[in-house]
Amino acid sequence: MTAQQKCNTEVTLVAIDVAKAWNAVLVEKCDGTHQRFRVANTRADHDRLMLFLKNQTGQCRVAMEPTGNYHRPLAYRLLSEGFEVHLVSSVAAARFREATFNSWDKNDPKDAAVILDMLKQGKVLSYHDPVTAGIHDLQEISKTYVI
């Protein structure tokens, strides 16, 4: 019988492939188990996701691939709840997926797996919300966002 391994670091990794209506979520718990599910872009589903993440062991590190502006409400909510949020470049994710799977085949569960792998390797950017960082007015003046 094999002995169970204890987690060295208490970090739960969360990868979110953001879309207009539904987000594909892949969670890797500190014991190595994975859990997949979908989260709608609604307050009720965001509430359920926050409750799920708060019940995880240790710290949660979240990475998401931004899609248009659909990532902003969820990222803002994650930050305001105290989670560490990172972004994965869409171009980098596409190149990583092509190199990993040797294919252009794209689907949400596969994209979430790619985001998780990139998070594990540290190939992510820290997310700074414009509203909480106090730079939203600069974005408005420079017109670097879409209403």
Image (cartoon, grey):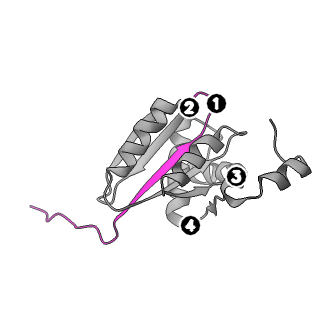
Which segment is the magenta one? 1-22
How far apart marks 4 and 1 lie (CA) works out to 26 Å
Q: In this view, does 48 lie to the left or right of 41?
A: left
Q: Which of 124 and 138 is in front in this view?
A: 138
Does label 4 or label 1 sit earlier along the sequence?
1
Q: Tell me if mark 4 has few (under 14), some (14-19) or many (20+) residues whose alpha carbon lies within 10 angstroms of its own.
A: few
Provide the residue designation for mark 4: 122
Closest to the camera, between mark 4 and mark 3, is 3
Provide the residue designation for mark 2: 41
Q: Tell me if mark 2 has few (under 14), some (14-19) or many (20+) residues whose alpha carbon lies within 10 angstroms of its own.
A: some
- Label 3: state its secondary structure: helix
Q: Do the residues labelled 1 and 2 touch (CB within 8 Å)?
A: yes
Does label 3 or label 1 sit earlier along the sequence?
1
Q: Is residue 34 left or right of residue 19?
A: left
Q: Nearer the viewer, residue 98 or 71?
A: 71
Q: Which residue is at the far top?
A: 21
Amino acid type at circle 3 is Val
Q: Residue at x 65, y 44 (%)?
A: 72
Q: In this view, does 84 lie to the left or right of 36?
A: right
Closest to the camera, between mark 4 and mark 2, is 2
Amino acid type at circle 4 is Gly
Closest to the camera, between mark 2 and mark 3, is 3
Look at the picture and state if 127 lies above or below 24.
below
Look at the picture and state if 67 lies above or below 131.
above
Does the magenta segment cover residue 125?
no
